[in-house]
Image (tube, rainbow, N blue to C red):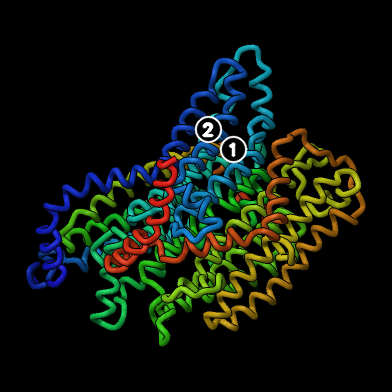
Amino acid sequence: MMTLAETGLQYPVLAHFLTTGAILFALGMIGFLTRRNLIIVFLCTEMMFQGVVVTLVGLSKYHMNVTGQTFVIFVLTIAACEAALALGLVVLMFRRKRTLDSLSWSQLSG
Amino acid sequence: MIDIMTTLMTLAQAAPEAAKATNVITEHLGNLIPELILLTGGVLCLMTGLGREEGTRKATAWIAGASLLLAIIFIPNIHTITKGFYTKEILDMSGFIKLAACSIGFLLLLVSAAVPDLLPQTKEAEKASKFDPGNIFRGEYFAFFLFSLVGLMLTAGAKDLIWLFLALELTSLPTYVMVASARKNIAAQEAGVKYFFLGALSAAIFLYGFALIYGATGHTDLTEIKNVIAAQNLANGELSGMLITGLVLTILGFCFKIAAFPMHYYAADVYQGASSAVTAFLAFVPKAAGFAALIIILSTVGWIYGPEKNHLPEILEILLWVIAVASMFLGNVLGMIQKSVKRALAYSSVAHSGYMVIGLLVGIPAVASDSAIGNGIAAIIFYLFAYGLASVGSFGILACVRNEKGEEVDSYDEIAGLFKNHKVIAAILALSVFSLLGMPPLMGFLGKIYIFGSAFQAGFIWLVIIAVINSAISGAYYLRIANAAFFGKPAEGITATNTPGRLTGAFIGAVATLVLGFTGGFLVDTASHAAEKPPVLRDDESKDKAAAFDINLEPQAALNKDIYAQ
């Protein structure tokens, strides 16, 4: 049984932040491509944004400047705007179709 | 360790720079006057759109138009730009794109001014004895229209990654609403939902790219990024993996905005589902913003690699090559097999992005050549202008014509024989699609010559051959549209809408492609001056630029003296 210090996980280094960010981003992307419920799909894009946020904060700490963290605040603002839009569109869709399945939108094709 | 040292040194230098910061802010604000005018106009539209009197509400479109015209007047150095049409003045890319955004934006406004009026819920709300603000969205439509244009203009002037991100989102977010609400049918809402979700995905992808670029360089300021990239390239002889990954993700994310392979699949659905007036908007504004952003991001790397020092880094070059070729073939081949005119034009939009990506590969030659042809970036911004005018003409006409159910025409059968009853409309449509095709006297031809010629000079022979083949393929569906409109059997119940604005906008767009096809030389000159230097300069490069400006300001100062002497 290794102690925490031996695993090297005692102090989070840049690689940990980047890996966490990349995993969040990848999970979000996979979810976006496989899920069909529009709310879940939207939350997956949010997860991708959060992956970016973790990456930015880690890099900001690494570079010892606050630009990355400033960026994060703006990213969160835009994510909030997109959430508002997404919920509006989801409500619109539910009123018209009574379902949130993304495959029910298939009028346009060809 | 070196990074830490540089950071500390930057911090040490920061104190005297704080004094400079105020000047920088004033300078920035001075450049942003047209954007501020449009933003103010947008907010005014939001208020008047809900006015108590009908006259106030109807004035909303006029306010939007007036603010666009006012913005053109206040574009920085507009005197230099208008003079630059004939003299060799230096101006920058953002000035050219702002001019294009405002002037084509005005045509787009003419085309879409009637969108809120034609909605059934607006008609009901206007007829009701007591005005119900919940059912009317005139204010929102014009405000979002202006906000999106502001986003495009801010993108063109971006100097920082954060700014670029916010500007691109400002371009996109209003368009999602415009698509979903400008037409009262379920197809428009489907298009809106699709557009929004894929847009959010692309935003996340290019944002991750931005984060990695920041990680590789430690800055979000584009000038600093360019400095660091140049220094890293000098030290290591190659670019770091993180930077390359970041750039690749950024380019892939931007492909959504320009509707290019591999993010092109939304284009047909969204362009078809949206109201035709909004489609005209989608075909120009996000695409221009995407190309402006691509030019800015690529110019941080610069076209200084390869054996002859005039190429992008190899990985980016391969990526852009694939994007260009795949977009051209997919766009033109899929466009050919469509039954809907709007879908065909949507795929043609994908193909046009492919042509323009060739210009990105060519880039800005290190030594400016004497001939106008040779600068890929100049070719792109000129082509955007040509494409914008032609797409205003073609989609504007589709917005003008209704079928017997009162819906916008979409299929080839419905536009068949337009010439018999609506001669002007058919002529405008034909002129626009011929310009898109690149018929000789028209502006589209000039744009294609410009792009293909610069690619030929830079040695992309295969790309030029592929592009010419693709232009020939695209003839199949463009000529089919013109053929249907002129020689088809007229369909029953086709009427033109009573919207003079739409016809005027489309008419100006189509006539401009003809006139500028003959007299567009000055625009070519302006474009090549605008793109003489990349939009992002290294510190040492910008000193050269300042020197160049000093030289160029002398005649201006002399001119001023003359004026004052009188």
Rendered view: B275 above or below B264: above
Q: Who's the residue at 28% across and 52% down the image?
A: A71
Q: What chain does badge 1 belong to? A: B
Number of residues whose C-alpha sits closer than 10 Å to that of mark 2, classed few (under 14), some (14–19) or many (20 or more):
many
Task: Indicate the position of residue B287 as horizontal and vertical percent values.
Answer: 54, 56
Seen from this angle, which residue lies furthest bottom?
A: B307
The amino acid type, in three-letter code, at marker 1 is Ser
Number of residues whose C-alpha sits closer than 10 Å to that of mark 1, classed few (under 14), some (14–19) or many (20 or more):
many
Instruction: Identify the residue position indicated by label 2 in the image.
Output: B140
Viewed as shown, does residue B205 lie left or right of B501? Answer: left
SS of the residue under disc 1: helix
Count the numbered circles shown: 2
Marks 1 and 2, how far apart in space?
10 Å
Seen from this angle, which residue lies furthest front?
A: B566
Image-quadrant location for residue B13:
bottom left
Rendered view: B38 above or below B59: below
Query: Mark 1 and mark 2, same subunit?
Result: yes
Q: Who's the residue at 64% across and 21% down the image?
A: B125
Image-quadrant location for residue B187:
top right
| Mark 1 in CB contact with mark 2 (< 8 angstroms) | yes
Task: Please tell me which of labels 1 and 2 falls first in the chain.
Answer: 2
Q: Who's the residue at 25% across and 74% down the image?
A: B231
Residue B150 visible to an observer of this rendering: yes
Task: Indicate the position of residue B56 as horizontal and vertical percent values.
Answer: 57, 20
Mark linked to residue B181: 1
Residue B198 visible to an observer of this rendering: no
Q: What chain does badge 2 belong to? A: B
SS of the residue under disc 2: helix
For the C terminus of chain B, which image quadrant? top left
The amino acid type, in three-letter code, at marker 2 is Glu
For the N terminus of chain B, which image quadrant? bottom left
Task: Indicate the position of residue B557 as horizontal and vertical percent values.
Answer: 38, 51
